[in-house]
Image: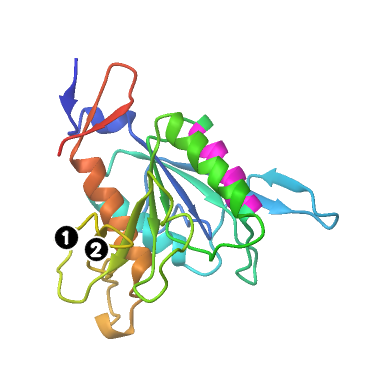
Amino acid sequence: MNQQLNSAAERTLRIGIIDTGVNPWHSHVRGQVSGMRIFSDSQGRIQEDEDFRDIVGHGTAVAGILRQGLPDAELFVLRVFDGELNSYPSLVARALLRAAAEGCQIINLSLGMPPGPGSDVLEQACRAALEAGSVLVAAGHPQKPGLLPAALAGVVGVISAEHLDPGEIEIDPQRSYSHQTSGWPRDLKGLPPAANLWGNSFACARVSLDLALNTSLGEEDSLSLCL
């Protein structure tokens, strides 16, 4: 029997975060957090380990937005960036497949890359994750149409908009990226808003949160959007 997502149903919700990692002890994030790192070794082979720590704070800020509205949801982190903030389509593709295999109903990708070598692998992974029942939400850029995976069919593409407040979302299927909302992360105590991060990445997380809060869970925990 379907039911609206609320504090009871939230316990079964798992959200994948493909990003720079997450600090699970941050005051904005604490709760159910697990994950892995996906990386290329010295011989170019894709490897996995349990080191999903965030050395730059980007993924932690994304997770903080999700946690604010979903205090009991499980966050499954897939770190795909190295210490120099490099990543590759093959790593993101593996992360998508892993997130879908781990049962993530929503997968947030606050990242984007232009079409090029490896695009086909990323597109195939997106199709596989969508077919597995995951909802994919990815960051675009107002001046860069065609970023992947946000521009792919079936993926919810998101950009930030200065005229919108957190919680306000505009949807236009005719745009390169259909959704736009506020790009502000959560406020940090002692840090002026102007000194905080801002942008498409955090707009992406806000749309992922909105989709989770306006979603019903079926008997097998698959998602159906309440539009």
Residue 93 included in the magenta stretch of the image:
yes
Q: Position of residue 180 (x, y in %)?
A: 24, 63
Image quadrant in which you'd find residue 191: bottom left
Residue 55 included in the magenta stretch of the image:
no
Give the farthest residue toward the front: 174
Report the front residue among 148 and 161. Answer: 148
The residue singled out by tag 2 in the image is 180
**Depicted 184 relative to depicted 5: above or below:** below
Residue lying at 42% horizontally and 60% vertically, measured from the top left: 110
Tell me: 221 left or right of 101: left
Tell me: 54 left or right of 30: right
| Residue segment shown in magenta | 90-100
Q: Which label number is shown at residue 210?
A: none
Residue 28 in sight = no
Asked if disc 1 and disc 2 are in contact, CB closer than 8 Å, the reply is yes
Under circle 1, the secondary element is strand
Mark 1: give few (<14), some (14-19) or many (20+) Cα within 10 Å: few
Under circle 2, the secondary element is strand
Tag 2: residue type? Gln
**Depicted 88 relative to depicted 98: above or below:** below
Give the farthest residue toward the right: 43
Tell me: 82 left or right of 191: right
Q: Quick one: label 1 or label 2, which is nearer the N terminus?
A: 1
Residue lying at 38% horizontally and 63% vertically, measured from the top left: 61
Q: Position of residue 201 (x, y in %)?
A: 38, 65
The residue singled out by tag 1 in the image is 170
